[in-house]
Image (cartoon, grey):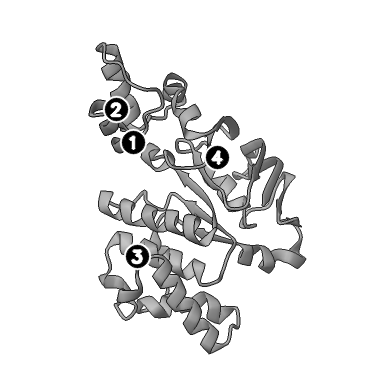
Amino acid sequence: MIEVRNLVHRYQTGEETPQEALKGVSLNIKDGEFLVILGHNGSGKSTLAKHLNGLLQPSEGEVLVDGMDTRNPEVFWQIRQHVGMVFQNPDNQLVATTVEEDTAFGPENLGIEPLQIRKRVDEALHSVGMEEYKERAVHLLSGGQKQRVAIAGVMAMRPKILVLDEPTAMLDPRGRREVMEAVHKLNREEGITVVHITHIMEEAVTADRVVVMEEGLLVMEGTPQTIFRKADQLRALRLDVPAMVDLAQQLKKGGLKLPENILTVEEMAVALCP
């Protein structure tokens, strides 16, 4: 469980008045939840992500991870072990020559014994579908494969919560699909809590809950069905809607009767060809 209470974050920009990136955000993240945080660039979503494992400290308010305050230096490493982070560019997180060496890097730095490291590496690579590539040189991997290795490296440290800050932004459609399938598998089969920060609407349709941010504030919250029903409001926030939501709206305007809350291609296909 992560509790964010009235979180304010200010960036100091030279001699100017500090810029307020977060303006009193409160949010509870439940164990085992798949939460998506949406927002355009500059909305504050990445700043919020960095608060969830103590990379940034609150200017005001607090963030509690399983009751541990991120401002307390005595629990700094415990929080980092609870909450693993994956960023936009996998090349910034891959540090070793081969896939298995990179996956082992985190546990080695935690002082885990070699036999346990071997077990963790094998399990982590299996969890993201990269076990057959364990001896492959990292630089020979595709973007989606690199990102899955970055996730495996975090998972080898056995976090309870996985925070992904726009992990598919630099990937092609195939790479995005590979990464999202791996993340959903971790959530579904391993019970890992996932916080997924993105601006890609299609990645939000299968979430348990969606949060929308704008100018450092949490402005919308609910299930994907609830959020994407408010297409006009999302567009006013400079966000798009999933392609199937847009298509359903256009078909309804043309007189076709369709069920409410169509979000995916599969749901559209069933609606059109019952």
Residue at image x 48%, y 51%? 165
On the image, numbered disc 3 is attached to which residue? 146
Task: Specify the amino acid type for callout 3.
Answer: Lys
On the image, numbered disc 1 is attached to which residue? 264
Residue 11 location, x and y as percent? 62, 44
Distance of label 1 from label 4 (alpha carbons): 27 Å
In front of the other: label 2 or label 1?
2
Please, what secondary structure does the residue beneath circle 1 have? loop
Asked if disc 2 and disc 4 are in contact, CB closer than 8 Å, the reply is no
In front of the other: label 2 or label 4?
2
Distance of label 3 from label 4 (alpha carbons): 26 Å
Residue 37 location, x and y as percent? 51, 41
Badge 1, how many Cα within 10 Å: few under 14, some, many 20+? some
Q: Earlier in the sequence, mark 1 or mark 3?
A: 3
On the image, numbered disc 2 is attached to which residue? 271
Please, what secondary structure does the residue beneath circle 3 have? helix
Disc marking residue 170? none
Residue 124 location, x and y as percent? 45, 71
Residue 107 location, x and y as percent? 54, 78
In front of the other: label 3 or label 4?
3
Q: Earlier in the sequence, mark 3 or mark 4?
A: 4
Q: Earlier in the sequence, mark 2 or mark 4?
A: 4
Q: From the image, which quarter does the C terminus lie in?
A: top left
Residue at image x 47%, y 34%? 224
On the image, numbered disc 4 is attached to which residue? 44
